[in-house]
Amino acid sequence: MIDFLKEAAHVKPGKKQLDWFEMEFYAFVHFGSNTFTGKEWGEGTEDEAIFNPEKLDCNQWVEAIKAAGMKGMVLTAKHHDGFCLWPSAYTEHSVKNSPCKRDIVKEAAEACKRGGIKFGFYLSPWDRNSKYYGTAAYNDYFCDQLTELLTQYGDIFYVWFDNACGEGKNGKKQEYDFPRYFELIHKYQPNALIFNDYGPDVRWCGNEAGAARHAEWAVVPSELCHYAEVQTGPGPMAGEGSLSYLYNTEKELGTMPNILYSRGLVFTPSEIDMSIRPGWFWHEEEKPHSLERLFYTYLTSVGANACLHLNIPPNRDGLIDQRDVDRLAELGDLIRRELGERIPASVRKEEGYGATQPVYTITLEQPRETINYVVLREDIAEGQRVESFRIVAEFESGSQYPLYQGTCIGNKKICQLQDPFAGQNPLTDDSEPEIARLKVQVTAARDEVLMKEISVY
C-alpha cells in the first residue's frame, strides 16, 4: 500500500502538459454554418451560400480574447455539420464555395501570431455531411483533412477532439481511429497537446457548466484515460474489482478509493470548458453570463488544478458581439484587480512536522483585517501529492480562526477565504482584530510535499 502511494506520488506530467498549465486560460471559438442557421448542431445539408460574414475580423477576436487575459485560441475548423472554415481539397462543403471565400483558419492563425497568443483547432470527428462517414474510407478522409490543418497553418499548440458519434448522411455511424490521428499530430506538430475524453494529454472535466470536482486530480486511473502513458504498477486492490465504469462524468476519479483498484495510473489533467453564453454558437437573443459567474468559474477551474477553455462565439458579421467584448474586458480587469498584486509576506516551512504533513507559516509584513485569497502551488513536475489541507488565521493576540479546508492542490489552488467576522453587528462589536499570520497545514499527502509557491492576495 505504502509503495503504491509513493508510485502514485511520482506520476509526472510531460513538458507539454507543464506548458499547458502555465497558459491557464484560453478561448474556444465556435463559428460556422450554425452561426447563420441558429442551430447548435447542424444537419450537414446546409447550403454553403448561407455563410457570409461580411465584416470578418480575426484581429478583433484576438484583442477581445487578450483583454480577458487568455493566452490562446482554439478555432472550430469543422463542427459536426462538416462545413470547413478552410478551403479543404477533400470536400466541397467549405468556405471555398461560400460568398466569403476566405481561409478563416489561416486568418485566425495569423491574427494569433500577430497578437502574441497561441493557436489551435477543433476538428470534429463526427461529420454529418461526408459520404464516407460510417465506412473504412472515412478515417482516410479525416486524416487527409487533419494533415491539411497540421501542415498549412504554422505552429499548433492544441488539437481538440470530442467523441461525439452520430449518424452521417448515409445513416451510418463511424469507428474513429484515434491512434492514427494522434500519430499524425505527433509527426507534424510534436509540441501540440491533444484533448480527448480518454487522453492522452488533457481530458474533459465531464460537464459544460464550468464546474470542477471537489478534488480535481491530474493523476487518474488508466481505465479512464487509456490513451495516456501508464506510469505505475497496479494498485493493491486491482485484482479484487473493476474500474470499467469510469467516465469523466463521475464525481470521483483520482481520489484514493479509485486509484487503489486501478491497473495503473496516468497523468492526464482536466480542462474546464464552458461558453460565455448559454449556447456554443452565437444566438442574437442570448447574452453573456454575469461577471460574477465567469469570475467564480475562473477561480474554480484555473484555481482547481485545471485550465479554463472559455468559448467566445463570433456573430453573423464575423465579429465578437460587443456585449461579449465588454464582458471579457470586465473579467480581465477583475482578475487583475483581485489576483494581480500580492500582499507582501514571508513564507517559512516549520520544523518538526512530518514530510507528508508539513506546516507553512505566512507572516504578513503588515497585519491586515482581511485577506481574500491564498494561492497554493505544488511542484507538479515531481508529481501531485497533497490529499488535503487547511488554512488558519493567527491574530496579533495569538488567537486562531480556521479560514479554509481543501482537498488536492496540484498545479494551482486558489483558496477564497471566508471572513471570520462576517455577520457581526457593527453597533455592538469591537473592531475586527488584524491577521498577523496564516498557517497552511497539509493534513494528508501521498509522499513528501513539494510546495512550489504560496502567495496571498
Image: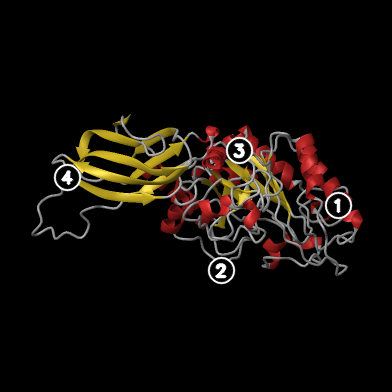
Circle 3 SS class: helix
- Give the mark toward the camera: 2 or 1: 1
Mark 3 vs 2, N-terminal side: 3
Q: Locate residue 130 relative to residue 79 in the image: left or right.
A: right
Mark 3 vs 1, N-terminal side: 3
Mark 3 → mark 2, Cα distance in angstroms? 38 Å
- Give the mark toward the camera: 4 or 2: 4
Q: How crowded is mark 1: few (under 14 residues within 10 Å), some or many (20 or more)?
A: many
Residue 249: image quadrant is bottom right
| Whether residue 272 can be seen here | no
| Whether residue 146 can be seen here | yes
User: Which residue bears the numbered disc 3?
Assistant: 17
Nearer the observer, 124 or 172: 172
Residue at x-position 53% and y-position 32%:
382
Q: Do the residues labelled 3 and 4 touch (CB within 8 Å)?
A: no
User: Which residue bears the numbered disc 4?
Assistant: 399
Q: Type of residue at label 3? A: Gln
Mark 1 vs 4, N-terminal side: 1
Mark 1 → mark 4, Cα distance in angstroms? 66 Å
The image's mark for residue 168 is: none
- Give the mark toward the camera: 3 or 4: 4
Mark 2 → mark 1, Cα distance in angstroms? 38 Å
User: Which residue bears the numbered disc 1?
Assistant: 139
